[in-house]
Each structure stands twice: as C-alpha cells, then as structure tokens.
Image: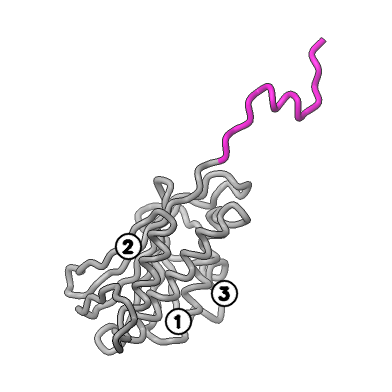
C-alpha cells in the first residue's frame, strides 16, 4: 500500500482489495496506526483513503475494501456487528449516489475512513457541486432517499451525518458512528480466580 505522512502501513493493497480490484480502486493509508487488538478490545486508529473510478462496478469494490479495512483494524465480531453493518450500508449508499449523479463532473470518487476517539467516520467526496438533501420519498420525489437512509442509520446509532462543500467546488458527504465502549479489564481478583491460583 502506498503510504504517506510517515505512518507505517496498516494494510497492503492485496490485503485490503485483492488483485482484481486494483484496476479500479486504489487505497492509501494516510495515517494508519496498524491493526487493532483483534480480541474485541480497542480498534486500531488511523485515517485511510480509498480512491475509485466513478463507475457502478466500484460500489461493491469500495464496500469490500472498507469491510476488510474495518476487520483489519479490529472492528469485527459480534460486538461490532451492528456498527460495521451500518457503516457498510452507508458506504454503499454514498458511493452509489456519487457514481450515479456525479460521474460526468467527477471521474473519481474518494472514500475516507477515520477511526479514532471512539468513533468511525466515513466520508465520500466527489467533484460535483450539487448538495443533496435528506427528503422523504413522497409526492413523486425520487432524490435524496439514499442520504435520508444514511442520516437515519447515523442518528439511530447516536452518530451524525452532513454534507459539506470542498475547496474545489465539489462536496463531501460524511457520517460518523460511535464505537461500542471498550470492554472493562478484569480486576486482579477476577484474574486470580480465573487462573485457579490459590494463596497459601
């Protein structure tokens, strides 16, 4: 994996994407701190960017790249299942929206994943200036349903979602979800009991 900012690589391209996806999707660790504990403890923190061509084939590739990234950083297993499923649905909706509506003005779509401070933030950026709004899909309206779903998932999880302009006139749509609280460490007494040790 290409690496910037002096950070050690969290994943390699084959690990995160697989060889077939390399043609359409490129992943860069901009500030990856390495993998998580892997034992249900604290996930690895960092910032990663996945760049894809604005084509419908990129949607599952980006989703799989994010899924593999989350797993590699320790966001996997029953404890993280709900937040991981929500994040992957959000990524699918946002990348689909970008490749469907922004491809003419934005040949690439960038997905950023940030893990830190007890949260995971995913953001999808494209070069199209239109900023969609979360609207109810009634009265013949067909736009905005994807963002409404994203916002609903984020708010249900206690997170947030927004649309912002970028410096070059495009937009970034982001959602942030809280991670489950770390599992409490066992007390010394519990550790002794679990090991079956006795004091004479």
Q: Quadrant of residue 104?
A: bottom left
Q: Quadrant of residue 185?
A: top right
Residue 181 is left or right of residue 136, and the answer is right
Q: Is residue 199 magenta?
A: yes
Residue at image position (32%, 83%) is 138
Residues marked 1 and 3 touching at CB (< 8 Å): no
**Residue annotated with mark 1:** 58
Of label 2 and label 3, which has the lower sequence position? 3
Q: Give the vertical position of 119 relative to 49 (above or below).
A: above
**Residue annotated with mark 2:** 161
Q: Nearer the viewer, residue 102 or 184?
A: 184
Residue 70 is left or right of residue 145, and the answer is right
Quarter that holds the C terminus = top right
Closer mark to the observer between disc 1 and disc 2: 2
Q: Residues within 10 Å of mark 3 (few under 14, many from 20)?
A: few
Region rendered in magenta:
183-200
The location of residue 41, given as percent across then percent down, is: 57, 44
Q: Give the vertical position of 73 relative to 103 (above or below).
A: above
Residues marked 1 and 2 touching at CB (< 8 Å): no
Q: Is residue 143 magenta?
A: no
The CA distance from mark 1 to mark 3 is 13 Å
Q: Secondary structure at mark 3?
A: loop
The circle on residue 18 is: 3
Q: Secondary structure at mark 1?
A: helix
Closer mark to the observer between disc 1 and disc 3: 1
Residue at image position (42%, 59%) is 156
Residues marked 2 and 3 touching at CB (< 8 Å): no
The location of residue 171, given as percent across then percent down, is: 24, 72
Residue at image position (48%, 57%) is 9
Q: Secondary structure at mark 2?
A: strand
The location of residue 85, given as percent across then percent down, is: 53, 65
Of label 1 and label 3, which has the lower sequence position? 3
């Amino acid at each position: 994996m290409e690496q910037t900012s002096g950070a050690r690589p969290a994943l390699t391209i084959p690990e995160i994407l697989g060889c077939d996806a390399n043609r359409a999707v490129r992943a860069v660790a901009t500030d990856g701190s390495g993998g998580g504990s892997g034992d249900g403890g604290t996930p690895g923190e960092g910032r990663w960017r996945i760049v894809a061509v604005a084509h419908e084939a990129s949607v599952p590739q980006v989703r799989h790249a994010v899924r593999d990234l989350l797993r590699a950083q320790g966001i996997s297993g029953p404890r993280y299942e709900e937040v991981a499923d929500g994040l992957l649905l959000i990524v699918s909706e946002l990348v689909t929206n970008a490749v469907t509506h922004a491809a003419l003005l934005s040949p690439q779509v960038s997905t950023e994943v940030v893990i830190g401070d007890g949260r995971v933030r995913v953001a999808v950026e494209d070069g199209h200036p239109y900023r969609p709004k979360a609207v109810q899909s009634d009265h013949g309206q067909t736009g905005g349903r994807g963002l409404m779903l994203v916002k609903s998932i984020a708010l249900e999880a206690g997170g947030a979602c927004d649309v912002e302009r970028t410096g070059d006139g495009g937009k970034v749509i982001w959602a942030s979800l809280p991670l489950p609280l770390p599992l409490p460490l066992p007390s010394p007494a519990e550790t002794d009991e679990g090991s079956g040790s006795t004091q004479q």
